[in-house]
Amino acid sequence: MNREILRIAVPNMVSNITVPLMGIASTAIAGHLGGDSAATIGALAVGVSIFNFIYWNCAFVRMGTSGLTAQAFGAGDFDECTNMLARALTVSVVLGAAVLALQYPLGEMALRMMNGDGMVRDYFYARIWAVPAGIVLFGFNGWYTGMQNALIPMCIAIAVNVVHIAFSLWFAFGFDMGIVGIAYASVVAQLVGVALAAVLLFARYGSMLTRVDWRKVLDMEAMRRFFAINRDIMLRTLCIVAVYTFFTAASSRMENSILLAVNTLLLQLFTLFSYMNDGFAYAAEALTGRFIGERRPDLLRRCVHGCMAWCLLVSVVFVGIYVGWWRELLGVFMSDDAADAQAVIDTAGSYIGWIIVIPIAATLPFLMDGIMVGATQTRVMRNSMIASSAAYFAIYYAFEPWVGNNALWLAFTMYMFLRGVLQYFMTGRLRMIYRRAEE
C-alpha cells in the first residue's frame, strides 16, 4: 500500500515543484528585460495573478474528472473510462471557447480590478489564447489521475515548463517582445502539453480505450452528476479565493508596512509545505476512487490510514525545518542587500510560531479533500469549506482589535484545522466513505 501511495504521490510532488520554478524563471526574465525592471516585474505579477484566478476557477474540471474516472477504473468499466475522458474534454473545449469569446469583458473587468496598465493589458490579450489548451490539460490530468497514472502528468508538467522557459527566453530576447513574449511562450507551452498528453494517451492506453458512445457521454443524468460535482468544487474554490485574497488585503491594510512583506513571505513557507502534502492528497484521490470502484473497503481503510501516516510525517518534518531554518528559508526570497531585510526578518520572528503550528493544523485538510474527491463526496467538501471560511472571517474580526496581525494568523490556522476536522466528522469519522466501498 505504501508503494501504491508513493507511486502516485511522488510524481505529483515533482509536478507541483515545477510550478514555482517556472514562476521564478519568468520573473528573472522580466527583471532582465531592461528599462524599469520593477515596473516590468510588477506588470508580470499582476498579469499572472489574473490568470491564476482564471485557472483556479477552472480547476474543477480536473477534480471532477479524477474521482469519477477512478471509480470506473476500479470497477473495470473501461467503456465508462473512455466516455469520462470524452466528457471531460468536451466540457474543457466548451469552457475554453467561452473564455475566448468573453475575453474582452473578462479582460477589461480584471484590468480595472487589478489596476493593470498597458503592459498588463498586452500580456493579458496575448496569454488568453493559452487558456483553452490549459483547461483541456486539466481534463487530461484529471483523467490520468483517475487511471492511477501520475507519471504522465509529471512528464507533461516538466515538458510544459521547459518549453515555457525556452520560448520565453527566445521571444523576450530574440524577438524583443518583452513580457508579451512570456505570454506567447505560455500559449506555445500549453499547446505542446496538449499534444504530448494526446500522444501519450494513445501510446499508453490505445489498446484499453473503447469506442466513444456519444449518447452516454452527453447523457443528461451523467452530465448532471458531473456538473453537480463540479458545482460543489467551484463553490469550494470561490471560498479559497476569498480567504487568500482577504489575507493579502488585510495584510496590506496593517499600519506597519513591513507586515505585508512578512505575511507574504511566511505564506510562501506554508506553500512549500502544501506542495508536499498535496502529493498525498492526489494519491488519496486516485486510490479512494479506485478502491470504491473495486468494492474493497479493506484496501480503502489501509489507503486512508497510510496516507494519514505519510501526511503526519511530512508535517513533523516541516515543523523541524521551520524551527531550525526559518531564517535561511526567508533569506531565499529576498536580497541581503535590501534596506529593510533585517527589519523583515526581525518582524517575522514575532510570527514564526504560526508557521510552526500550521503544518500540524493542516495535516488533515489536504488529505480529506483528496478522499472526498475520490469518493465524489464533494458536497461534504463544499459545506465544510463554507463553514471554515465563515469561521475564518469571524475569528479575524473578533480578535483583530485586540491582537492585530496575530488575529489574521489565528484565523488562517483555525480555517485550515476546521477544513480537515469538519470533513472527518461530517462523514461520520469516514464511515460514510467506507460504506461507499461496501455498496
Image: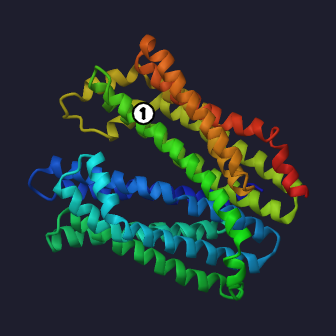
Does residue 142 appear in this view? yes
Q: x, y (%) of residue 69? A: 70, 68
Which is more toward the observer, 64 or 286? Answer: 64
Q: Residue at x 81, y 60 (%)?
A: 291
- Secondary structure of the residue carrying numbered label 1: helix
Kind of residue at disc 1: Phe
Residue at the disc numbered 1: 247
Specify the farthest residue to the left.
35
401 left or right of 74 in image: left
Q: Residue at x 62, y 32 (%)?
A: 417
User: With respect to residue 78, does 395 lie above or below?
Assistant: above
User: With respect to residue 250, does 116 lie above or below?
Assistant: below
Q: Residues within 10 Å of mark 1 (few under 14, many from 20)?
A: many
User: With respect to residue 13, does 96 lie above or below?
Assistant: below
In terms of image quadrants, where is residue 175?
bottom left
Does residue 163 appear in this view? no
Q: x, y (%) of residue 190? A: 41, 72
In terms of image quadrants, where is residue 351?
top left
Q: x, y (%) of residue 298? A: 88, 54
In terms of image quadrants, where is residue 250?
top left
Q: x, y (%) of residue 8? A: 65, 61
